[in-house]
Image (cartoon, rainbow, N blue to C red):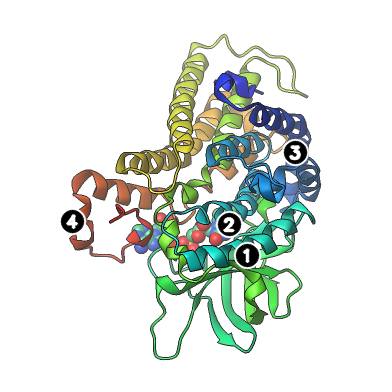
Amino acid sequence: MSDFRDYYDVSKFRPQHVKMLELINDLGPKFAERAAKHDKEASFPTQNYNELRDAGFLRLVIPEEFGGMGFSLGEYATIGAEIGKYCGASALTFNMHTSSTMWLRFMYEMPNLTDAERTAFARMREIQFPKVVNDGAIFSQPISEGGANWTSEPIKTNCRRVEGGWVINGFKKFASLAGNCDYYSIVCTEHFEGKDPAHEDTMDFAVHKDTKGLSIVGDWDPIGMRGTVSRDLVLKDVFVSEDDLMMPAGVFGKTLSQWPHMMATLTPAYMGVAQSAYDFTVEYLRGETPGLPPIDRRIYPTKRAAVGRMFQRLTEMRTLWTTAFFEARAFPSKAEVMRVYAAQYAVMEGVQELAALAIRTCGGQSMLKSLPLERIYRDSRCGALMLPYTTEIMEDYLSMMTLYDMDDVDQVTSDTASARVSMWRPAS
Ligand SMILES: Cc1cc2nc3c(=O)[nH]c(=O)nc-3n(C[C@H](O)[C@H](O)[C@H](O)COP(=O)(O)OP(=O)(O)OC[C@H]3O[C@@H](n4cnc5c(N)ncnc54)[C@H](O)[C@@H]3O)c2cc1C
């Protein structure tokens, strides 16, 4: 297994950052050991989460004044990728949790909030952060609803004002951590009498797992990322109050579009999976795979060439991805946005190419379920289809940004429903 110092220049990293990278690499081998069982059973890696919690990882991006570690988005990304090197599913769900805390952190810091929004937001942070810092709570982030791309139309799950709060009704598809988290961060649209559902009425509530009206439904038997346990949620007249809010009304729309890197945070898990495909191949060809006879397969020039190609692809992906994440900020420039879209594309497509090449290079035995490459290959297939930044959508955004001036983007006719609501626009 590669050491993170093989691909990062840690002389540029803060000591706390290096310490957490070391820590995750201490925990990682156990995650890798457990990954086979959770993949087979499609069960949740609870023990991994207990260890992540004990080591402080659940509060990684929470501001220090709230008892968190205050990691930047780029620092988080490198941690997520190290987890993914050992267990892709753990890294993917770790992102759902961390993203929920990231929104509370970074959206609050946005310069375009009004004073009233910032005051309301400050109170929400005082309620939500301690749940993680003091109680070790895990948050999930079920946004997807299946069938309707939430980047094109307002979220279908809705809330309506009632005495003392709101009631939520709706359905969430692919709720990673279903049954294994303490809070579901439920993004929904507030409905008003006589007004059509609108993006600006998007709301976000922390719904406790035991709340009346919340149920987990459906089975979970997917091709890959099985340990995420991404079952469906039904919300039937779920009551929530002001105390459950995770973002003031209207803030979702005005902040996320100006923080585009925040939606690229599914990539760390897949960056890690890509690294593990490469690492497996190197170990295998050197005859160092645990449990297998020490056969030296480096003697074949074809295999050597393939590994050279894998290293080149992996380095290209990692370099672009690291650059994009370390320049992440609110109100980025067009060039920065295009880099993060390109990085998203490179990782989600590249991981599949690497895993496929690893299987081709290592050969027949590497497909056996007794070895991790077969799982890595299946996990690698899941990244490109994850909304809102599927690789198809990244192609669309980049095609528009390369060929048109930003002022013209919204005038270009499209023969299909557009997914461009999530697309970055220059701040006016
Ligand atoms: C392992 C796993 C875990 C997941 N966990 C979560 C989670 O925790 N939270 C969460 O919110 N979601 C989660 N998802 C869901 C994921 O992000 C996507 O929403 C889901 O995979 C989309 O599948 P669909 O069939 O519903 O897509 P559809 O909405 O049917 O879209 C299918 C494809 O069509 C393309 N497409 C759709 N609309 C447009 C458009 N307007 N323009 C151009 N192209 C378009 C997209 O590229 C998309 O890939 C998870 C998915 C997986 C596989």
Residues packed near mark 3 inside 10 Å, few (<14), some (14 to 19) or many (20 plus): many
Q: Seen from this angle, which residue lies furthest front?
A: 115
Nearest-to-viewer mark from 1 and 4: 1
Q: Are marks 3 and 2 in contact (CB under 8 Å)?
A: no
N-terminal of the pair, mark 4 or mark 2, is 2
**Ligand 1 within 8 A of label 3's CB?**
no
Q: According to the image, label 1 marks what residue? A: 124
Q: Quarter of the image containing the N terminus?
A: top right
Residue 366 pos. (x, y %):
63, 30
Q: Quarter of the image containing the C terminus?
A: bottom left
N-terminal of the pair, mark 2 or mark 1, is 2
Q: Amino acid type of disc 2? A: Leu
N-terminal of the pair, mark 1 or mark 4, is 1
Label 1 to label 4: alpha-carbon separation: 38 Å
Name which residue lies at 81% across and 47% down: 50
Q: Seen from this angle, which residue lies furthest top?
A: 299
Residue 301 pos. (x, y %):
49, 11
Q: Amino acid type of disc 3? A: Phe
Q: Are marks 3 and 1 in contact (CB under 8 Å)?
A: no
Q: Are marks 1 and 4 in contact (CB under 8 Å)?
A: no
Residue 408, numbered circle: 4
Q: According to the image, label 2 marks what residue? A: 104
Q: Amino acid type of disc 4? A: Asp
Q: Are marks 4 and 3 in contact (CB under 8 Å)?
A: no
| Residue 270 position by quadrant | top right
Nearest-to-viewer mark from 2 and 1: 1
Label 2 to label 1: alpha-carbon separation: 8 Å
Q: According to the image, label 3 marks what residue? A: 31
N-terminal of the pair, mark 3 or mark 1, is 3
In the rendered image of this protein, does residue 295 appear above or below residue 333?
A: above
Q: Are marks 2 and 1 in contact (CB under 8 Å)?
A: yes
